[in-house]
Image: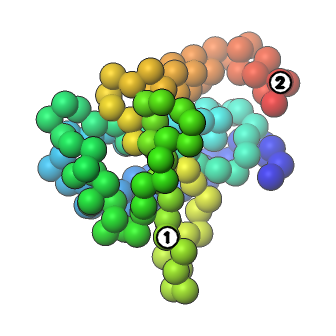
Amino acid sequence: MLIQPYHLEWKNSFNKIKQLLNEPLEHLEVSIEHIGSASVPNLAAKDIIDIDISYSDNVSFDEIEKRLMTLRYFHNGNQGILGREVFKRAIETQKHSILDAITHHLYICHFESIELGRHVLLRDYLSNNSSAREEYQILK
């Protein structure tokens, strides 16, 4: 997948997915964050929407997992990164018009997770620092 110039559509795509994720997670203390390069305005990135769902001590991971299963997401372990659990969509013959049309990664993190902190810190730093954003883009 090639790096592309920033697209405003990435924010719209995130919002569409977020709206769908909010439905089964309603009434849970969770936050849904757009993270990764595509979340940073004016940064070239891969056309992939990265999403972190963070949860508080008042919510169990098992409850989030159970509710995401209603959208046909399944837990795929931490894939070698502690503090970040990966969820993927089940492959079906009938595709969802949004969840299977927009390439995205879905992660679940406790709100005190180091990985969540790193994701949000990098996003916010690059969003607010044009010279760092330009340097980061050159590295990509």
Q: In the image, is 98 to the left or to the right of 112?
A: right
Count neighbours of disc 2 (C-alpha within 10 A) and say few if under 14, some if 14 to 19, many if 20 or more: few
Write down the quadrant of residue 91 in the picture.
Answer: bottom right
Closest to the observer, 121 or 63? 63
Closest to the observer, 80 or 9? 80
Count neighbours of disc 1 (C-alpha within 10 A) and say few if under 14, some if 14 to 19, many if 20 or more: few
Percent x, y of residue 114? 44, 21
Q: In the image, is 130 to the left or to the right of 86?
A: right
The residue sitting at 59% across, 62% down in the picture is: 102
Q: Amino acid at mark 2?
A: Leu
Percent x, y of residue 135? 79, 17
The residue at the far bottom in this view is 93
Specify which label sits upstream in the sequence, 2 or 1: 1
The residue sitting at 44% across, 42% down in the picture is: 85
Q: In the image, is 70 to the left or to the right of 52?
A: left
The label number, if any, that marks residue 90 in the structure image: 1
The relative height of residue 48 versus residue 52 in the rendered view (above or below) is below
What distance separates the C-alpha of mark 2 from that of mark 1? 34 Å
Write down the quadrant of residue 6 in the picture.
Answer: top right
Write down the quadrant of residue 67 in the picture.
Answer: bottom left
Whether residue 98 is visible here, answered yes or no, is no
Q: Which residue is mark 2?
A: 139
Percent x, y of residue 2? 83, 49
Label 1 sits on a secondary structure element that is loop
Q: Amino acid at mark 1?
A: Ala
Label 2 sits on a secondary structure element that is helix
